Image (cartoon, grey):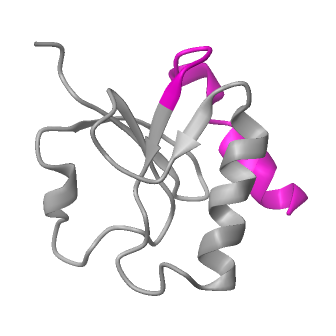
């Protein structure tokens, strides 16, 4: 758990300091122990932000191994703004 938290903490400088941040749920195995552990690690590492399991927020975290193969339509309208060596990324929706 400590390793996962450190991996997600590396995303903090590229996120707003508080508020809701989306979290792209895994395409396959969304309810698996590993998927749930990663989501909780992101929440603990990035508090006081609230990590919500959906898209629609300005910022969305995409954990390593989360996207659908060949491109993920859930990220349509978002662009990548940051990433970590572990493969976790942040996407952002352009301002209207």
Residue 42, percent from left and from top: 67, 48
Is 43 inside the magenta-drawn segment?
A: no
Along the horizontal axis of the image, is 65 left or right of 39? left
Q: Residue furthest right?
A: 2
Where 47 sits versus 87, above or below?
above
Which residue appears at 54% of the width and 21% of the height? 19
Which of 80 and 85 lies nearest the eye of the viewer?
80
Which residue appears at 51% of the width and 59% of the height? 63
Q: Which image quadrant for residue 26?
A: bottom left
Which residue appears at 89% of the width and 56% of the height? 2
Q: Which image quadrant for residue 96?
A: top left
Q: Which residues are magenta?
A: 1-20
Which of 64 and 25 lies nearest the eye of the viewer?
25
Residue 44, percent from left and from top: 78, 43
Residue 24, percent from left and from top: 40, 56
Where 71 sits versus 19, above or below?
below
Q: Which image quadrant for residue 28?
A: bottom left
Along the horizontal axis of the image, is 29 left or right of 72? right
Along the horizontal axis of the image, is 46 left or right of 79? right
Query: How many badges with numbers are in the image?
Result: 0
Which of 81 and 17 lies nearest the eye of the viewer?
17
Where 42 sits versus 94, above or below?
below
Is 2 inside the magenta-drawn segment?
A: yes
Which residue appears at 57% of the width and 46% of the height? 84
Along the horizontal axis of the image, is 83 left or right of 28? right
Quick one: quadrant of the N terminus?
Answer: bottom right
């Amino acid at each position: 758990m400590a390793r996962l938290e450190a991996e997600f903490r590396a995303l903090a400088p590229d996120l707003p300091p508080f508020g809701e941040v989306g979290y792209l749920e895994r395409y396959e195995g969304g309810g698996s122990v590993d998927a749930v552990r990663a989501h909780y690690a992101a929440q603990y590492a990035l508090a006081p932000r609230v990590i919500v399991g959906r898209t629609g927020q300005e910022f969305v975290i995409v954990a390593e191994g989360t996207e659908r193969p060949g491109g993920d339509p859930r990220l349509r309208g978002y662009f990548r703004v940051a990433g970590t060596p572990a493969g976790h990324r942040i996407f952002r929706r352009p301002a209207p």
